[in-house]
């Protein structure tokens, strides 16, 4: 099934807007991961950099690349077929969504497990070994 172009104008605007938001988020995660914690200009205690800095470098990279990947594909789905030829076919969007979901769940799950193991007051380990 090929999506016939032209796509209605509202969907084009929404697709490009959502794609741009995903691309900006992806760049923020990837490029912002280069700064050490507390070094970025938006590093207030409750600010967005504080949330990003709590994630490991691997998680920031995975989230950033997923954002870039999804943003590109959102833009390519509303563009004419000849503009951006490298894309997952529209009828297989679920493969793209599933792969991105698995990557995000996998990296956040790994962070959660590592955090539970490295935390000294973890309930998994007995506090008293006498």
Image: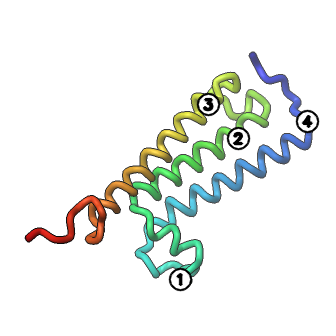
Q: Is mark 4 in CB contact (under 8 Å) with mark 3?
A: no
Q: Where residue 29 sits in the image (x, y, percent)?
A: 53, 61
- Distance between mark 2 and mark 4 Cα atoms: 15 Å
Q: Is mark 1 in CB contact (under 8 Å) with mark 4?
A: no
The residue at which mark 2 appears reads as 74
The quarter holding residue 54 reads bottom left
- Crowding at dot 1, Cα within 10 Å, few <14 / some 14-19 / many 20+, comes out as few
Mark earlier in primary sequence (1, 4): 4
Mark earlier in primary sequence (2, 3): 2
* Closer to viewer: mark 4 or mark 3: 4
Q: Residue drawn at (54%, 40%), measured in percent from left and top?
A: 100
The residue at which mark 3 appears reads as 86
- Distance between mark 1 and mark 4 Cα atoms: 43 Å
- Distance between mark 1 and mark 3 Cα atoms: 41 Å
Mark earlier in primary sequence (2, 1): 1
Q: Residue furthest top?
A: 1
* Lateral position of residue 62 relative to residue 77, left or right: left
The residue at which mark 4 appears reads as 8
Q: In the structure shown, which secondary structural element does the residue marked by tag 3 occupy?
A: loop
Q: Which mark is residue 45?
A: 1
Q: Residue drawn at (53%, 80%), measured in percent from left and top?
A: 43
Q: Quadrant of the N terminus?
A: top right
In this view, 108 is above or below 12: below
In this view, 67 is above or below 93: below
Q: Residue drawn at (69%, 22%), measured in percent from left and top?
A: 91
Q: In the structure shown, which secondary structural element does the residue marked by tag 4 occupy?
A: loop
Q: In the structure shown, which secondary structural element does the residue marked by tag 1 occupy?
A: loop
* Closer to viewer: mark 1 or mark 3: 1
- Distance between mark 4 and mark 3 Cα atoms: 22 Å
Mark earlier in primary sequence (4, 3): 4
In this view, 119 is above or below 19: below
């Amino acid at each position: 099934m090929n999506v016939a172009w032209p796509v209605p104008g509202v969907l084009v605007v929404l697709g490009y807007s959502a794609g741009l938001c995903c691309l900006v988020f992806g760049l923020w995660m990837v490029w912002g991961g280069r700064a050490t914690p507390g070094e970025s200009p938006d590093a207030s205690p409750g600010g967005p950099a504080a949330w990003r800095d709590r994630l490991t470098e691997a998680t920031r990279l995975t989230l950033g690349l997923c954002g870039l990947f999804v943003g590109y594909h959102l833009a390519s789905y509303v563009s004419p077929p000849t503009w951006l030829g490298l894309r997952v076919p529209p009828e297989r969007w679920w493969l793209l969504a599933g792969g991105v979901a698995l990557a995000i769940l996998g990296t956040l799950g790994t962070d959660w497990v590592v955090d539970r193991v490295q935390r000294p007051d973890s309930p998994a380990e007995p506090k008293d070994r006498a």
